[in-house]
């Protein structure tokens, strides 16, 4: 049975520290990105491996942005990441992401890929999703989309068994 947008899990992506690195420890593409009809521009460093990882992630998850980049994330990063022209949804949150993710997910499983998960404070295991911290010097390069999906499936099975 194939998954639809109503059943696929959601991968929530932060931009800074995940796709745009300040002090990279991995090979990067240095470029200037634009949004808002070129009224907004920023010089960025994106991991060379990011486009391939994003493509594989999008095969297994519905992608949602949750970043200070807001509605600018998709148009600004579209070319450098090779993402579809149709923008992925964004959650208008920079902080307190978990309530916004849960409201958007509406019961669907999710993962949050963020370099600042430790800013959430002490957070217990999430029964409906996974917090996936990344090193801001490596960003998304540490993510294996296939392994992440398998980990999410195991986590959900374990949470369901514990009910």
Image (tube, grey):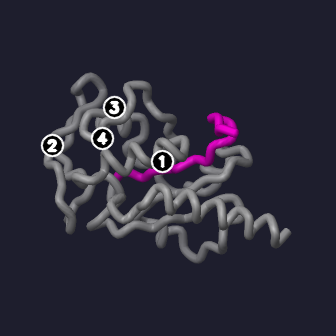
Q: Residues within 10 Å of mark 1 (few under 14, many from 20)?
A: many
Name the residue carrying label 1: 66
Say which quarter of the image contains residue 23: bottom left
Determine whether the residue tagged by mark 4 lies in a helix, strand or loop. helix
**Residue 81: mark:** 4
User: Taking 117 as reference, is 107 left or right?
Assistant: right
Determine whether the residue tagged by mark 1 lies in a helix, strand or loop. strand
Say which quarter of the image contains residue 82: top left
Task: Give me the C-alpha separation between circle 3 and circle 4.
Answer: 10 Å
Name the residue carrying label 3: 75
Name the residue carrying label 2: 31
Task: Give me the C-alpha separation between circle 4 and circle 2.
Answer: 11 Å
Residue at 24% x, 54% y: name it. 47
Determine whether the residue tagged by mark 2 lies in a helix, strand or loop. strand
Task: Give me the C-alpha separation between circle 1 and circle 3.
Answer: 14 Å
**Sequence-wise first label, 3 or 4:** 3
Task: Give me the C-alpha separation between circle 1 and circle 4.
Answer: 17 Å
Residue at 31% x, 34% y: name it. 78
Magenta segment boundaries in residue numbering: 1-15
Determine whether the residue tagged by mark 3 lies in a helix, strand or loop. helix
Is the C-beta separation of discs 4 and 2 under 8 Å?
Answer: no
Q: Is residue 107 above or below residue 24?
A: above
Place of residue 80 in the rendered image (x, y in percent of width and height, measured from the top left): 25, 39
Residue at 68% x, 36% y: name it. 6
Place of residue 37 in the rendered image (x, y in percent of width and height, measured from the top left): 27, 22
């Amino acid at each position: 049975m194939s998954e639809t947008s109503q059943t696929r899990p959601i991968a929530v992506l932060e931009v800074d520290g995940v796709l745009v690195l300040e002090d990279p420890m991995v090979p990067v593409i240095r470029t200037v990105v634009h949004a808002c009809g070129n009224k907004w521009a920023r010089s960025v460093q994106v991991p060379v491996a990011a486009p391939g990882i994003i493509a594989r992630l999008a095969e297994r998850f519905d992608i949602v942005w949750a970043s200070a980049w807001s509605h600018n994330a998709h148009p600004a990063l579209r070319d450098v990441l090779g993402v579809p022209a149709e923008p992925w949804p964004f959650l208008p949150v920079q902080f307190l992401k978990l309530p916004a993710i849960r409201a958007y997910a509406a019961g669907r499983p999710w993962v949050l890929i963020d370099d600042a998960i430790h800013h959430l404070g002490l957070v217990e295991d999430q029964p409906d999703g996974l917090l996936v911290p990344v090193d801001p010097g490596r960003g998304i390069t540490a993510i294996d989309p296939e392994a992440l999906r398998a980990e999410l499936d195991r986590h959900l099975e374990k949470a369901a068994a514990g009910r």
